């Protein structure tokens, strides 16, 4: 469905749509965000909007894109950088225009030199990122020097194609101009995201210039963050909701998400920061306990429902939560198999947290597709499931739900749901397709070939006979009985 652009008429908005209350004319690009996708709009920019609404100031947001076309950025600029956020739940919706964005840069429109210059500006104090795990170009805890784009950026650092190359180029120019310290803050949903980002930037810089690497070590911090908000990909239905919420007006940059949001930030900033705590963010000394809690409970149960739910014909997480069996087994996964592996602050009620997640999953207004969550499984499984499995093997715990999730994934990557084909989105999809194509009907060989993916399955797990047998059994249960029955059998 094609929707024509129209400039928003603020005077024609319904009365329940809120607009920025702060002075937007004073905003300066003090935060630059790379990767302005759905989550950045619904979470990162929203928190800065609320910070400005609560405390004022001039902490404006410049948003940067390295890929695609600048069309949506052009539309954003035509709307004075305002865009719509619709928070929706079964209880109702809340619609507002967010105004923290004050500038856009797109490499295809503005050129890479302008992006580098922008990162070097003295007024800029924070560079934040949502570029997905693939964007950091890190393998086994090190910068992936075999990555063709990293190789290209090292050969031509003045014309970077990756976010890491761009950041280093900006920092190099910042150092040359004497424009002082800055913070680079990852907001991606991956463990130790600040550490990972720091490794990529420092190692890239060291390959270029030892003095630059030393300057970065002294003048740039890389705080970790934990982000949590369900922001489904836009659908025709959610676009209709945006239009209805705006009284019939169209906003091509609008986004729909759940009301819940949580942001935990390591308070480690070299050159100041916005007062995000005014918008409900938690500034802490150590993000890791919150990060692990979210990755294993929310993300771990999401993946469980994504693979097994999709194979059972459930198109959304809300569909899964509406099924009493899937609901009950997802809760058992969280409470019985994930929560025992966590070490969180004493004031956190873990069972209440699990129940709050299930309530969020039950939000029928969010069309969070199981197929969407199933993407990039080879990168998600280690932190969502496999670390917990290692804990249980070491401590004699139960991990039936976790291993059934693995069996579900192994069936899912066959790209066949009762004769219906679908795309498997994964950075290793060629290798996975090769394993599937070589399968001659011997399930043992097929499962063992997947377990041999050492970038996914740690060697100590694969060497454990109990684990291997459990994976083979889980794969066969899903393949022979179907996902729905395999999940139902967990209750026995």
Image (tube, grey):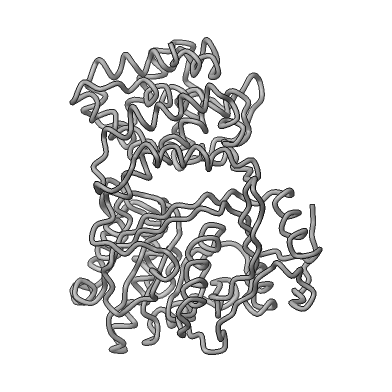
Residue 20 on image: x %, y %: 60, 77
Residue 306 to residue 150: above or below: above
Left or right of 454: which side holds 249?
A: right
Position in image of residue 365 (x %, y %): 65, 45
* Residue closer to the observer: 73 or 147: 73
Q: Say above or below: 303 vs 203.
A: above
Q: Residue 381, relative to residue 444: is it above or below?
A: below
Q: Position of residue 442 (x, y in %)?
A: 44, 10
Question: In the picture provided, is 175 more to the left or to the right than 351?
Answer: left
Q: Is residue 205 left or right of residue 68?
A: left
Seen at 31% across and 46% down, the residue is 348
- Judge from the rendering whether residue 207 lies leftward or rightward of residue 492; answer left or right: left
Q: Which one is in front, 370 or 443?
A: 370
Q: Image point 62% across, 29% down: which residue?
A: 314
Q: Specify the quadrant that holds the C terminus.
A: top left
In this picture, is 402 found above or below 348? above
Q: Position of residue 352 (x, y in %)?
A: 40, 40
Residue, x 65% and y 77% (percent of image)? 77
66 and 23: which one is in front? 23
Mark count: 0
């Amino acid at each position: 469905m094609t929707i024509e652009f129209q400039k928003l008429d603020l005077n024609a908005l319904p009365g329940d749509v809120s607009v920025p209350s702060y002075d937007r004319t004073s905003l300066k690009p003090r935060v630059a965000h790379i990767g302005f996708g759905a989550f950045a709009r619904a979470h990162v920019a929203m928190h800065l909007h609320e910070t400005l609404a609560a405390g004022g100031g001039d902490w404006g947001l410049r948003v940067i894109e390295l890929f695609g076309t600048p069309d949506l950025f052009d539309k954003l600029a035509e709307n004075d950088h305002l865009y719509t956020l619709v928070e929706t739940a079964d209880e109702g919706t809340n619609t507002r225009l967010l105004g923290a964005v004050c500038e856009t840069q797109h490499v295809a429109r503005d050129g890479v030199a302008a992006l580098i210059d922008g990162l070097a500006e003295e007024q800029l104090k924070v560079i934040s990122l949502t570029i997905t795990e693939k964007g950091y170009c890190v393998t086994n805890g090190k910068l992936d020097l075999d990555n063709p784009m990293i190789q290209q950026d090292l050969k031509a650092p003045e014309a970077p194609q990756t976010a890491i190359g761009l950041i280093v180029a900006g920092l190099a120019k910042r150092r040359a101009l004497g424009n002082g310290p800055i913070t680079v803050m990852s907001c991606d949903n991956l463990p130790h995201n600040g550490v990972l980002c720091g490794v990529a930037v420092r190692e890239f810089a060291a390959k270029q210039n030892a003095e630059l690497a030393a300057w970065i070590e002294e003048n740039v911090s890389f705080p970790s963050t934990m982000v949590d908000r369900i922001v489904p990909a836009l659908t025709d239905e959610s676009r209709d909701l945006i239009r209805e919420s705006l009284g019939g007006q169209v906003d091509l940059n609008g986004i729909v998400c759940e009301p819940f949001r949580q942001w935990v930030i390591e308070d480690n900033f070299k050159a100041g920061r916005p007062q995000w705590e005014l918008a409900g963010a938690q500034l802490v000394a150590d993000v890791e306990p919150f990060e692990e809690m979210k990755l294993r409970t929310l993300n771990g149960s999401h993946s469980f429902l994504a693979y097994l739910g999709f194979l059972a014909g459930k198109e959304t997480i809300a569909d899964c939560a509406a099924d009493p069996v899937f609901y009950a087994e997802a809760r058992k996964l969280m409470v019985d198999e994930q929560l025992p592996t966590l070490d969180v602050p004493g004031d956190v009620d873990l069972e209440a947290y699990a129940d709050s997640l299930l309530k969020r999953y039950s939000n029928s207004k969010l069309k969070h597709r199981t197929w969407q969550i199933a993407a990039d499984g080879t990168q998600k499984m280690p932190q969502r499931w496999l670390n917990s499995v290692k804990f249980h093997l070491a401590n004699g715990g139960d991990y039936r739900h976790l291993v059934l999730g693995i069996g579900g994934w192994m069936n899912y990557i066959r790209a066949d749901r009762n004769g219906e084909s679908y795309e498997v989105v994964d950075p290793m999809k060629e290798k996975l397709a090769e394993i599937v194509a070589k399968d001659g009907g011997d399930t043992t060989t097929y499962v063992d070939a997947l377990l041999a993916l050492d970038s996914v399955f740690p060697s100590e797990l694969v060497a454990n006979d109990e684990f291997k047998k459990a994976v083979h059994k889980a794969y066969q249960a899903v393949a022979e009985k179907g996902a729905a029955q395999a999940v139902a059998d967990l209750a026995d």
